[in-house]
Amino acid sequence: MSRRLRMGMVGGGPDAFIGEVHRKAARMDGKIELVAGMFSRTLAKSQQTGAAQFVDPKRVYCAVDEFIAKELKQPAGKRIDFVCICTPNSSHYPVAKAFMEAGIHVMCDKPLTTDVKTAKAFQQAVRQSGVLFGLTHNYTGYPMVKLARDMVRAGDLGELRKIVVKYPQGWLSSAIDAEGQKQASWRTDPAQAGASSCMGDIGTHAENLAEYITGLKMVELCADLTTFVKGRRLEDDGNVLVHWQKGVKGILHASQISIGEENGLTIYIYGAKGGLEWHQENPNYLYVKSPDGPLQVWCRGNGYVGAKSPAAARATRIPSGHPEAFLEAFANLYANFAETLNARLDGKLPDPLALDFPGIDDGVRGVAFIETCVKSAKAGAVWTKLPKV
Amino acid sequence: MSRRLRMGMVGGGPDAFIGEVHRKAARMDGKIELVAGMFSRTLAKSQQTGAAQFVDPKRVYCAVDEFIAKELKQPAGKRIDFVCICTPNSSHYPVAKAFMEAGIHVMCDKPLTTDVKTAKAFQQAVRQSGVLFGLTHNYTGYPMVKLARDMVRAGDLGELRKIVVKYPQGWLSSAIDAEGQKQASWRTDPAQAGASSCMGDIGTHAENLAEYITGLKMVELCADLTTFVKGRRLEDDGNVLVHWQKGVKGILHASQISIGEENGLTIYIYGAKGGLEWHQENPNYLYVKSPDGPLQVWCRGNGYVGAKSPAAARATRIPSGHPEAFLEAFANLYANFAETLNARLDGKLPDPLALDFPGIDDGVRGVAFIETCVKSAKAGAVWTKLPKV
Amino acid sequence: MSRRLRMGMVGGGPDAFIGEVHRKAARMDGKIELVAGMFSRTLAKSQQTGAAQFVDPKRVYCAVDEFIAKELKQPAGKRIDFVCICTPNSSHYPVAKAFMEAGIHVMCDKPLTTDVKTAKAFQQAVRQSGVLFGLTHNYTGYPMVKLARDMVRAGDLGELRKIVVKYPQGWLSSAIDAEGQKQASWRTDPAQAGASSCMGDIGTHAENLAEYITGLKMVELCADLTTFVKGRRLEDDGNVLVHWQKGVKGILHASQISIGEENGLTIYIYGAKGGLEWHQENPNYLYVKSPDGPLQVWCRGNGYVGAKSPAAARATRIPSGHPEAFLEAFANLYANFAETLNARLDGKLPDPLALDFPGIDDGVRGVAFIETCVKSAKAGAVWTKLPKV
Amino acid sequence: MSRRLRMGMVGGGPDAFIGEVHRKAARMDGKIELVAGMFSRTLAKSQQTGAAQFVDPKRVYCAVDEFIAKELKQPAGKRIDFVCICTPNSSHYPVAKAFMEAGIHVMCDKPLTTDVKTAKAFQQAVRQSGVLFGLTHNYTGYPMVKLARDMVRAGDLGELRKIVVKYPQGWLSSAIDAEGQKQASWRTDPAQAGASSCMGDIGTHAENLAEYITGLKMVELCADLTTFVKGRRLEDDGNVLVHWQKGVKGILHASQISIGEENGLTIYIYGAKGGLEWHQENPNYLYVKSPDGPLQVWCRGNGYVGAKSPAAARATRIPSGHPEAFLEAFANLYANFAETLNARLDGKLPDPLALDFPGIDDGVRGVAFIETCVKSAKAGAVWTKLPKV
């Protein structure tokens, strides 16, 4: 890459979780440096994080307008190349929109917005703006997920038939949100999270994972959402029957009250000729199934993986048996985003494989999924078509 | 036990699968001997199996009426004590009814009948007959399933919230039924299997397992059934949203087209205080989950298992680390059935733990489940209440 | 088979463990029936077990001489066809010898004797006697072990290089033998167990497993044996460096004090072209490794297993996904022994695959292994050649 | 931390593997920046890497003397704070010595030297120099390894009895070193690797892991080393019996020819009260065993882990279920080294937990282990005492 990219950040203050994940992921490969940030809406807190991150205090902000205005005044060689937005859900859109309108490239947390209408309008605006837009549906950054996608694309499974994707967690099994645990509180607060907790926070990762691997969009679904913990304002569990394109049937279920489950995103895909299985918590392995041969365990980092999936090989930093995990997968989004941005800044076409990071279209479909789940559930868990997006 | 019980058999001829499973299970503990049988409706085939089983040729039959009539003429010390029925689905009921009406005790394969109305009438008749009736929902014979049930009963999981039970298989992923594979052909033939293939053959085991462990009955369900293999007459895949009693929500899914899956019956149960997980293919382990401690793996055959679950200890033949599996679990149904029958023949009350085998009531609920799935699916996968049974 | 074989038994009384395992294994397939026995040296205890096993009280004995004499007086159609010997180690040999000398076929527990010299003399005598002799090195009865052997024989691993075989248990981690636990007491008593506890009871199973799969005999070894529990008279742990034939190197380690390990017999084999791994506690899977492809998990009961290994297919009773385990593997020894004996009684040659059960030669090598371990350890864990046997 | 530390690097040029691992690990937390380096002895190659790393070309070197001299001329606020040495084995010592003598702190790859005598002399010199010295025995950076250590320290396992530690790899199963694969070539070249390949490259990690967790040093060992691949000059496999302090017995085995094994460092530890098991390839789990309760699986990132081991909690970046892996463990060495160095630069005492990184003493014992293995093997795999170090 011809330059180290300069990143600004909105979010990621003292009590945040995902902000530091973004920073570690962005930093890991040495091709991005954090140079400015609004880490909190409170200046003192913002400066506290800025200092811990060795950011020049003059480039630590506590308002979006000021952030944009002051950065635009920086000379070309110092100004941020893009901003990372890692705030609670409801501010993703207004913040992203402001940066986009200022012509600053954006890497944004999911979900994109809290309703489809806004999402579609924003999609239109982003397309017209020419701004590069990334969305951190981070689980698609795993090499073995890319391998799975390339196997499906190559027809190794034959015509697809069934998808089972689940995302159980247990951390909200009691009312820790009511007790003020920050991560729990905003995720179950409609004002900050939107109309859904479980589906918006994690269900949509499951939806995105299934689509990324299979290339199929959801057509209709039947969502049975439940709030198990008394007093909670948003659902903490959901079981969804899904019809995908091309007659594929299946299930998506997610939960925040499944005690003992940590971050159990798992997918099973079956076609007329084979099957696949992948577990996020043990991500270096892809289980490949055939009707008349042994189960195969494909292990990250091997030559035979790269031969099947150049995208998986590119997304791999260290040899087989030296496990990679969540942060490396997250970093793969940044790596491709950065390579694409660098190419654009150089006026070149990027390596086509560098375009493999989630963006505005994933975001719109994610919001459509969440909104349709909520609509279906409110109507009594009835079959509901997804909007065309 | 005061006597070795004499078993007769209907089914289990030369091409059968489950018949020999019944025989091995019945024989394993040395307390049951096979002395008579109608192994086929063709006499030569019936004699072929009879000879291989060292059954007296004079007690090998090819018609139910003759079987019953001749056995009833045997003296008390030679006559069969009970009959095992392991034919295709549609004959379970007529054969069982005939033996019941002759006052002969019955161990019968599931499903009980092919419709609820008949099942309920038969339930009534069995109750009035005084005949001992067992039904081979064999997966509840596993010791770790009994441990799971006893943990739930003891309140270790708190109030239950969610159940996920799945039963994926892949053996019908292509049209082997059309090619004449016998096991496949009858299971997908409405005349022999009833109105369902996947739900009737395996979905109902999943339903029974969930109920056995939790004690909860299904209230309503929404079943999305699909026939993926062209030309097949019954469904080969099903995804079902379920509401159980006491507000418990969840999913049951089963499949015969999930390539690479063999016999993957698996259950996950979550309550307000803990969780459980059990896998039929690796059945000696129960995974026990808590909100604030390590995952526990309870291993069959240990003292701490027996201390929690005398029923699990009773269902265990050999020490921990010496794995037990499918046949031993199947044999546990026979062991309890035999102990109960022996006590009855002695005019005694059996050990209460000996009563732990599935019976006519499980059978009726199983048929209700199958029928409701089919009804829901035909109406477009809509929520449908289970009949009161 | 042309007849159901009649089995007598020595051992397996009220407090025994392995006796009932033999009985269940022998009974499972319906081709062997228990008709006589000396289950204990105390008549009352022997009769107690005999009654529980429905054995005619007139054929329940409490002395070997009487057992043999009275059975020989039985008419041909009633007399036992063979005897099963499942007593503590030190009586295997004298009991087996007595039956052999009476011309009665023998299935005997391991180890064969407590010293090599006796073992070799007995081997000679058995060969001359014409008696059929089986030895229950039961772990070679597992289908996936047979598959492993057939893969090695077919050259799939190339020239072999390294073997790692381990057999950790933890049940003797405290002094339960001193507290009178019967299974523990005799195994650590030199008078009953011989010169070794850990190596004699389980190490020799590991040795036999490695030889069965690879066909290689041990050439020399260096054994570091330890007694960790105070007051115990025999070793409860051993670590052994081994040189096999053809330059194969490796390790055998066994333990009775490895807390948390249950019956963890596990083997890893590496050659110039591939590798294998098998775990007794999860026995339905064989892990097959290659230098440039995915890990393969071969699953018992599939067509591709039988295509590679007819012996594995023969040793399989139920379909894939319906797990088989310890008792079924044990029963496979009886099944082949019985088929071979039946053929002999019919004056026919048995199916060559029926000859696949351990016998007198395995017994002699097992004793040589144990004796060499003890000799090496006593000399300070020095390299010691195995005797030619 | 009061400052971002400036790192220099020796090694890690265009064809290197471990250099970029060091860089990613150092960069991940944003507290270290790479500002100078001699990435190769060829200037063009060194500049190539320097450019890719965005290092000022004026601070890219191709000779150690020049590197040191020029950096010492840098002003205090620009000069490197420490150097990372990640060259082939034989240059670790001379390079480290040169930087130490210049008063520059050192983070060095293992092994420390290629003989014990030099190692001890260097240890003495480092101690006198006051230079902070880290050694990348990186596997001790895993949180669950720290938890294991803290459990052993707390006496949870009781008096220790047995250790089994293994490190199988398969990547050198054929003669890729002879074909010029760079990573393979130097590791099997005595001039670059020292007297051992397998033990020096990976066996010593196993040795260090066992000592880190248990606190026990090796007393004597018996090493059976083999070169399986023809033409290779150093051993590619080793099986070692070990006596540790306090009567602990066990086995260490490592291999580079175990096909299908990738980087399978695994340890099992048994005491009088419990046991532990940890697998590097699935590093987020620690298996904890007791004589009379279920197996416990402790999962990284949970409160109960941190309650037992503050060191594990400190070494954890992201929540449970979001797996961490090799690079994060490696980064933990840098994090503690950096915190200790920062405190020293500030004239303060570091947090005692920050001192938890391997150093010169680990290095000396590692060299002693390698040397003793080679000595034992050459004498015919005889018991050999380790030198006092």
Image: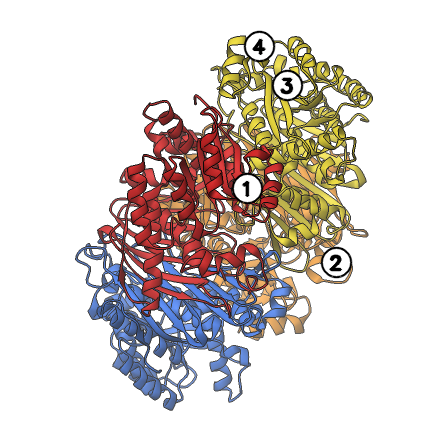
Chain colours: A red, B blue, C orange, D yellow
Q: Residue at x 61, y 50 (%)?
A: C110
Q: Residue furthest bottom?
A: B128
Q: What's under tag 1, amino acid-wise? A: Glu
Q: Which residue is mark 4?
A: D41
Task: Let me know if marks 4 and 1 both belong to one chain.
Answer: no
Callout 2 secondary element? loop
Callout 4 secondary element? loop
Rendering coords of residue C92 (x, y %): 64, 53
Relative vertical location of residue B321 with respect to residue D191 in this rendering, above or below: below
Q: CA distance from mark 1 to mark 2?
A: 56 Å
Could you tell me which chain the residue with mark 2 belongs to?
C
Q: CA distance from mark 1 to mark 3?
A: 35 Å
Q: Which quadrant holds the N terminus of chain C?
A: bottom left
Q: Which residue is mark 1?
A: A20
Task: Let me know if marks 2 and 4 both belong to one chain.
Answer: no
Relative placement, left or right, of C195 versus B150 is right
Callout 1 secondary element? helix
Q: What's under tag 3, amino acid-wise? A: Asn
Q: CA distance from mark 3 to mark 2?
A: 51 Å
Could you tell me which chain the residue with mark 1 belongs to?
A
Task: Let me know if marks 1 and 2 both belong to one chain.
Answer: no
Other residues around mark 4 within 10 Å, as few (<14) / some (14–19) / many (≥20): some
Q: Nearer the viewer, mark 3 or mark 2?
A: 3
